[in-house]
């Protein structure tokens, strides 16, 4: 059996193969979303979108970034996990994934400086620095406000576990709230949440610990990271080492590594992000970025870049990508 199609023990769960559908916010039939009142209720169209990809063979389906709090919403009609009203839809979604033989994961997000002010109200961030030119300027969060963040994530994680999800992934990537604290370009704080790498990691680590404590070992806990959002600031590999070792110590069980291109070298040396990560921690990895063929996915596994392969846009284009990849073998 090929590596790609062989099962893998992910924390307390077994995933049937190594193919992951990474979180992807999908504007599936926005009119139906609108009918759901923007409350992130799971519409039939969204349910069908995920069900067919689980039926199409993906071992682990990670549902798109779901807002943990109203102030963290980014997408009109996006999935939300911020109150018990979200539970019936999320429960149907997790059950549909299980019925199709996949593990059910969900990514939890707070948009922070990249929120959508029409939904979130004033944007929250580490410092009053625009995320992108022309976008609304976030407010620098007070320490008291920061104390709420781990609680929002922990409560959302508890709801997701109650709905039946096997994996809780914290969105620590792509410039959203938790990642924005890691970025020196966005985080100019001089208190204990800014400055040194340890201070910039503080919010993410407090959040990981709060979630771990709240859900215990009822689900696998993962974090998505994206060093590329920091590379233009000259992000040193040492900061990355500190981050992944601290995440492991805080109770993270899988790291989801988001890259523009999974094989590409990083930090100026001939190692991929997956290979760097393995130098620093034994945690299992999911690698995403530009993987379209089964041959490339198999090569990533065989060369030790990762244990699980996230195939995003290629599974949007072809929901049966995983089944076809395994039938080819
Ligand atoms: C339409 C779309 C929506 C996305 N939404 C998310 C998201 O909700 N959370 C996230 O971490 N990444 C998101 N991403 C990034 C993907 O998870 C993935 O990392 C990226 O598409 C690269 O993988 P690929 O080359 O296999 O598509 C999104 C990407 C696309 C194309």
Image: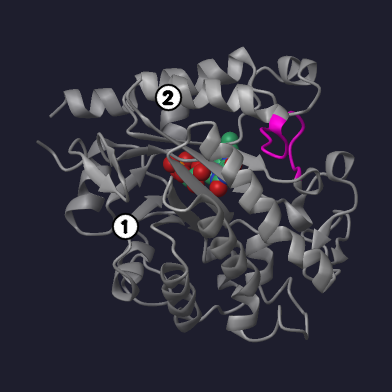
Q: Nearer the viewer, residue 243 or 135?
A: 243
User: Could you tell me which quadrant the N terminus lies in?
Assistant: top left
SS at mark 2 in the image: helix
Specify the label residue 97 is tagged with.
2
Percent position of residue 150, x then y: 66, 60
- Residue at 25% across / 52% down in the picture? 300
Measured from the top left, where is residue 306 in percent x and y? 29, 55
The magenta span reads 73-84
Residue at x 38% of width, y 52% of height: 287
Left or right: 98 in relation to 191: left
Farthest-out residue, left: 1
Q: How was this image coloured?
A: one colour
Which quadrant of the structure image shows residue 51? top left
* Marker disc for residue 284: 1
Which residue is at 59% across, 20% downward?
46
Is the residue marked by circle 2 packed among few (<14), some (14-19), or many (20+) residues within 10 Å?
many
Q: Secondary structure at mark 1?
A: loop
Q: Position of residue 71 (x, y in %)?
A: 81, 48
Quarter of the image for residue 132 reads bottom right
CB at mark 2 closer than 8 A to ligand 1?
A: no
Please state if 160 lies on the left or on the right of 80 as rendered.
Answer: left
Instruction: Please say whether residue 115 is visible from this viewpoint.
Output: yes
In whole angstroms, how far apart are the C-alphas of marks 1 and 2? 22 Å
């Amino acid at each position: 059996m090929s590596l790609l199609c062989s099962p893998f023990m992910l924390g307390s769960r077994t995933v049937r193969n190594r193919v992951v559908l990474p979180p992807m916010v999908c504007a599936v039939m926005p009119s139906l979303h609108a009918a759901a009142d923007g409350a992130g209720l799971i519409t039939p169209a969204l349910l069908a979108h995920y069900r067919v990809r689980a039926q199409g063979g993906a071992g682990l389906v990670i549902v798109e970034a779901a807002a943990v709090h109203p102030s963290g919403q980014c997408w009109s009609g996006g999935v939300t996990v911020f109150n018990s009203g979200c539970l019936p839809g999320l429960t149907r979604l997790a059950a549909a994934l299980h019925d199709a033989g996949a593990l059910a994961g969900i990514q939890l997000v707070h948009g922070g400086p990249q929120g959508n002010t029409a939904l979130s109200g004033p944007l929250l961030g580490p410092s009053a620095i625009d995320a992108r030119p022309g976008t609304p300027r976030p407010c620098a969060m007070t320490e008291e406000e920061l104390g709420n963040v781990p609680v929002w994530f922990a409560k959302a994680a508890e709801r997701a576990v109650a709905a039946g999800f096997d994996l809780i992934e914290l969105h620590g990537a792509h410039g959203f709230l938790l990642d924005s604290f890691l970025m020196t370009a966005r985080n100019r704080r001089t208190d204990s949440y800014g400055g040194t790498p340890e201070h910039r990691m503080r919010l993410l680590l407090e959040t990981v610990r709060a979630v771990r404590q709240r859900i215990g070992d009822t689900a696998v806990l993962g974090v998505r990271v994206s060093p590329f959002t920091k590379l233009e600031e000259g992000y040193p590999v040492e900061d990355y080492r500190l981050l992944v070792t601290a995440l492991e110590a805080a109770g993270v069980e899988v790291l989801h590594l988001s890259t523009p291109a999974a094989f590409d070298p990083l930090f100026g040396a001939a190692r991929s992000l997956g290979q760097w990560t393995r130098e620093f921690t034994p945690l299992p990895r999911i690698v995403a970025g530009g993987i379209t063929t089964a041959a490339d996915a198999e090569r990533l596994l065989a060369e030790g870049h990762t244990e699980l392969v996230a195939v995003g846009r290629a599974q949007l284009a072809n929901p049966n990508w995983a089944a076809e990849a395994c039938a080819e073998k």
